[in-house]
Amino acid sequence: MYLVLGIVLAGLSIPSMLSAISDQRAPRASAITVLIAGGLILLAIQTQPGGYRLEDIPDVFVRVVAQFIP
């Protein structure tokens, strides 16, 4: 759950960061969101015995989404 949430947050913060940079503003909120996303991803890697491999990520997404779909 942490891994999926962290990846989604990181992906959603990219447009906000690009918008702030293009408007010549400091991307403060985006930077905080990226830090939170990185922390969630790090937490997920540390709590999973053996960590995650790159090819495991799509399967993790499917398992998390399947938990919420009845």
Image: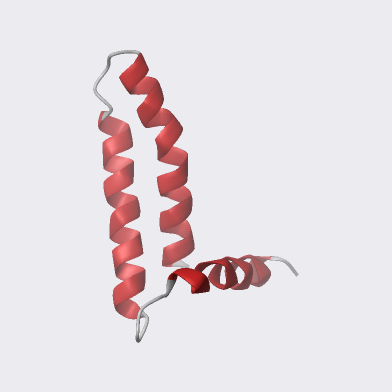
Q: Which residue: 35% across, 86% down?
A: 49
Q: Which residue: 48% across, 61% down?
A: 4
Q: Left or right? Give the position of 62 relative to 30.
A: right
Q: Looking at this rendering, what residue extends furthest in the top direction?
A: 23
Q: Left or right? Give the position of 64 relative to 20.
A: right
| Colour approach in the figure | secondary structure
Residue closer to the observer: 64 or 11: 11
Q: Which residue: 72% across, 66% down?
A: 69
Q: Looking at this rendering, what residue extends furthest in the front direction?
A: 55
Q: Position of residue 15 (x, y in %)?
A: 45, 31
Does residue 42 sit above or below 20 in this rendering? below
Q: Looking at this rendering, what residue extends furthest in the right direction?
A: 70
Q: Which residue: 57% across, 67% down?
A: 58
Residue closer to the observer: 50 or 9: 50
Q: Position of residue 18 (x, y in %)?
A: 38, 26
Give the image quarter of residue 20. top left
Residue closer to the observer: 56 or 31: 56
Does residue 8 sit above or below 65 in this rendering? above
Give the image quarter of residue 43. bottom left
Indicate the quadrant containing the C terminus: top left, top right, bottom left or bottom right. bottom right
Q: Position of residue 47 (x, y in %)?
A: 33, 79
Q: Position of residue 25 (x, y in %)?
A: 27, 17
The total of numbered circles placed on residues is 0
